[in-house]
């Protein structure tokens, strides 16, 4: 028996993302952001997207290309303070923004990836993040119902992948990637290194390839992935 | 950094006890590590998936995949670990985080904290601040005593949207160390050169004074 090969060309795989898709995007700051997939999505111009991402990158980087192109209808995010363009798009009503506590965003995505309906948490219960949310009592305490979150598509960045889609990550470039890699109908991983089957030791396969639909090898590590000189 | 601020940072560093797991908020709180001995036994946590934060590196030696939650290019030390964002906040919410040092816009005398949103002016999202403030075993604030216009930040009640309710235990400022008690704010120490009158005028709520001489820092 042999595991299937899921490697595919960048242009071909991004063309499968439809207008209106909910797209989970990995990354926390620069590390783990799938810059090449985002560039291609910006180039192809799909519209009305709902993006789910920890942060809005910085002006001129990552999802900012999609926001600048008017491709993003809604952004579900924990923090966008480093991107003045995203703040302006939010303030001028060009992009709807839903804020989520960082670890709760992670758990909502994990629940989505685990086939669950929601999580219960007291995080934010005394804050305005609780507004409009269902409250239930559990073990004698009030808890917010935070719905699970799944994407039509997830775009993740791996340091290494084999052609079946087993993924390994580097340092703090993990962040939301392993969670999002479980939580979408179509999971697309870009990888710095694409290895043959057996190239990733089973003990080192952090995201099992069975969750992954497509693997794209990066031709080059562009400047966007590099050190930011602020 | 002004002399008063450096003394505040040095004083706040004494919050950190051997063996703790600690999260330092972005800005002034990250500077307390400069006041810990190199061999001090403490585990620093970063929201983006790192325990065992090592020194910040110059850009020419930085690893593009290794940052802290504030975007600084940090390093690992022997025993460091990487993990995903769900694991990172599992640690925060489950009671493993002994201490967090956070910045503030406002702190109320009942321990309410507002540090993430100024409606109409500043609303970038709270990131991980709500979970840190709500779940760290001890929540300590580091801030200037007054804002840039000279208005007190220590108040009877917060006017801004809350980050967490009733969680702040202590406040380190450039003028004083103040505890939040069941009776409200209690002065613990005064910065050198600050008088009782000055600290009362700079504080927007009643302030209990310690018995006897007020310790200085």
Image: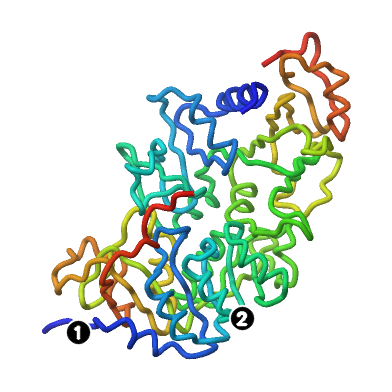
> Which residue sits furthest top?
B213
| Residue located at (52% from left, 68% from top) | A53
Of B159 and B138, the residue lying toward us: B159
Crowd rating for badge 2 (residues with CA inside 10 Å; few <14, some 14–19, many 20+): some
Vertical placement of residue A72 versus B186, above or below: below
Per the model, the C-alpha gap separating discs 1 and 2 is 36 Å
Residue B75 location, quadrant: top left
User: What residue did someone put label 1 on?
Assistant: A4
Of A204 and B174, the residue lying toward us: B174
Crowd rating for badge 1 (residues with CA inside 10 Å; few <14, some 14–19, many 20+): few
Q: Secondary structure at mark 2?
A: strand
Q: Position of residue A130 (x, y in %)?
A: 71, 65
Q: Is residue A187 left or right of residue B46?
A: left
| Residue located at (21% from left, 77% from top) | A163
Vertical placement of residue B164 versus B44, above or below: below
User: What residue did someone put label 2 on?
Assistant: A73
């Amino acid at each position: 028996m042999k595991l299937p090969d899921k490697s595919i060309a960048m242009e071909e795989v991004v063309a499968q993302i439809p207008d209106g898709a909910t797209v989970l995007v990995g990354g926390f700051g620069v590390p783990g952001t799938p810059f090449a997939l985002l560039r291609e999505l910006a180039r192809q111009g799909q519209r009305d997207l709902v993006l789910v991402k920890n942060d809005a990158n910085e002006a001129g980087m990552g999802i900012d290309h999609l926001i600048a192109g008017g491709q993003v209808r809604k952004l579900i995010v924990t923090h966008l303070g480093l991107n003045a363009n995203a703040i302006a798009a939010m303030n001028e009503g060009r992009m709807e923004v839903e804020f989520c506590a960082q670890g709760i965003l992670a758990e909502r995505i994990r629940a989505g990836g685990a086939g669950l309906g929601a999580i219960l948490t007291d995080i934010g219960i005394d804050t305005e993040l609780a507004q409009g949310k269902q409250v239930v009592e559990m073990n004698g305490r009030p808890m917010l119902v935070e719905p699970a979150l799944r994407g039509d598509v997830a775009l993740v960045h791996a340091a290494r992948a084999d052609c079946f889609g087993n993924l390994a990550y580097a340092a703090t470039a993990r962040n939301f990637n392993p969670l999002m890699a479980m939580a979408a109908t179509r999971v697309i991983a870009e990888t710095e290194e694409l290895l043959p089957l057996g190239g990733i030791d089973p003990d080192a396969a952090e995201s099992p390839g069975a969750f992954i639909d497509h693997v794209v090898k990066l031709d080059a590590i562009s400047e966007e992935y590099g050190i930011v000189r602020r | 950094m002004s002399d008063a601020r450096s003394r505040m940072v040095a004083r706040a560093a004494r919050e950190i006890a051997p063996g703790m797991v600690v999260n330092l908020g972005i800005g002034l709180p990250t500077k307390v590590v400069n006041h810990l001995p190199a061999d001090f036994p403490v585990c620093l946590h970063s929201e983006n998936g790192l325990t065992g934060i090592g020194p910040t590196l110059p850009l020419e030696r930085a690893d593009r995949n290794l940052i802290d939650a504030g975007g600084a290019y940090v390093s690992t030390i022997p025993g460091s670990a990487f993990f995903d964002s769900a694991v990172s906040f599992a640690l925060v919410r489950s009671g493993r985080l002994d201490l967090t040092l956070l910045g503030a816009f406002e702190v109320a005398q009942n321990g309410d904290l507002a540090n993430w949103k100024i409606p109409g002016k500043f609303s970038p999202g709270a990131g991980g601040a709500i979970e840190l403030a709500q779940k760290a075993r001890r929540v300590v604030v580091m801030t200037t005593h007054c804002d840039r216009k000279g208005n007190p930040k220590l108040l009877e009640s917060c006017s801004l949207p809350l980050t967490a309710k009733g969680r702040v235990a202590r406040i380190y400022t450039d003028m004083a160390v103040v505890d939040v008690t069941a009776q409200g704010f209690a002065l613990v120490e005064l910065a050198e050169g600050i008088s009782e009158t000055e600290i009362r005028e700079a504080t927007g709520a009643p302030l209990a004074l310690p018995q006897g001489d007020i310790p200085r820092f």
